[in-house]
Image (tube, rainbow, N blue to C red):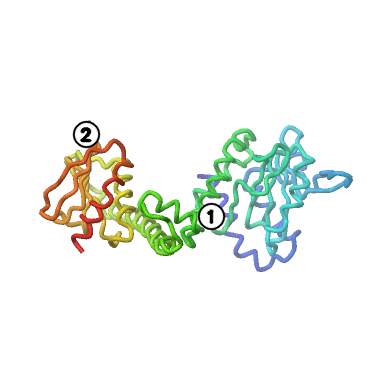
Amino acid sequence: MEFIEELKKHIARIDSLLPSIQTEEATKMSLIVPFFQALGYDVFNPSEFCPEYTADVGIKKGEKVDYAIIFNNEPAILIECKSCTEDLNKHSSQLFRYFGTSTAKFGILTNGVIYKFYTDLDETNKMDLVPFLEINLLSSTEQKLSELKKFTKDNFDSDKIFSNAEELKYTALIKEYILKEIENPSIDFVKAIISGIYDGHKTQTVIEKFTPIVKKSFNQIFNETVNNRLTAAITKDDEPEEEEIEKPTSKIVTTEEEIQSYMIVKGILAGSVNLEDVVYRDTESYFGILFQNNNRKPICRLNLDAKKKHIMIPDENKNFTRYNIESLDDIYKYKDLLIESATRYM
């Protein structure tokens, strides 16, 4: 936490400094050098934090990278700096050239606000084109800022960072891809989503029909998740702290498998009912999925804890028929019955 607090002090200064910084040199001295000082490096010791480090590139001799962080007399991190007024997207090629001529395992491209971290995951001694970590000091969460602790002088471990870099890189790319698809779903993405819930041919008309439904469904999932967390946080804050009241321990445990079954049923019902009306209520004897959170409007009941897993679906007289299932995928076999059960209440 001490490191995060030190980092926050540095970040707090950035906004006030930015209007007066117009050059690369001013960016280095006002933003970049203090940043690495916050990471614990002696920025006034050239054997540790070396400015204008020579990185010969091919036939070009005397090429210099702005800074190199040195461990055991060898460069470990190369740092290429740009003015805070510059867009970093067009400057990675310079760092790319330096990286291949050095023993450094990591490269950082920065304008004092955004820091892009590179390594050679794809091909040894050749810097990746995509950073494995990108941090905007003015907009990153505390959780993301904590990743910087690995690059502090006291915690730096090249092998550990490299082994974690692949997960960081692809986690970021996957999140970016999913967010882009949710905002503007592609044909392939929609096909993949509906492949388990729609048995007919995935024609252009069908894809166009389901595209807004897919987008809406994901937005609802995110909204529900955020609302649930907010509700939980508010409830916790509202609980009296001065005295603890003993409450009987609930025997109800909602499992991850039950939540997955709930999501499958919601997926099946997408396009047939308003998904906000589809809720679950766990009990000691079964996991129930209801319409409008009304016990008199059951869509189905599942028992996934029994020796024989089963789903029970009611008819128009609320008489339940039991269907054994081997896995959650078997729920899709009862798609028509589930849609019939849910739409009956509309």
Q: Is residue 333 above or below residue 296?
A: above
Amino acid type at image mark 1: Ser
Q: Is residue 328 left or right of residue 3?
A: left
Is there any visible trace of residue 85 in the rendered image?
Answer: yes
Determine the residue located farthest toward the bottom in the rendered image.
19
Q: CA distance from mark 2 to mark 1?
A: 45 Å
Amino acid type, mark 2: Ala
Task: From the image, state whether disc 2 or disc 1 is nearer to you.
Answer: 2
Instruction: Tell me where residue 61 appears, x and y as whole percent.
Output: 88, 45
**Could you say whether the residue bearing mark 2 is in a helix, strand or loop?**
loop
Q: Work out whether residue 145 or residue 133 is closer to the camera in this orientation and state it.
A: 133
Q: Residue at x 29, y 50 (%)?
A: 265
Taking the spot 52% from the left edge, 53% from the top edge, the residue there is 177
Left or right side of 276 for 9: right
Residue 226: image quadrant is: bottom left
x then y, percent, for residue 328:
31, 41
- Disc 1 element: loop
- Residue 306, numbered label: 2
Image position of 4 (left or right of 278): right
Q: Are marks 2 and 1 in contact (CB under 8 Å)?
A: no
| Number of the label disc, if any, that sits on residue 140 | 1
Picture coordinates of residue 246, whole percent (x, y): 18, 42
Q: Position of residue 237 (x, y in %)?
A: 30, 54
Quarter of the figure with the C terminus: bottom left
**Few, some or many C-alpha atoms within 10 Å of disc 2 (few <14, some 14-19, many ≥20)?**
few
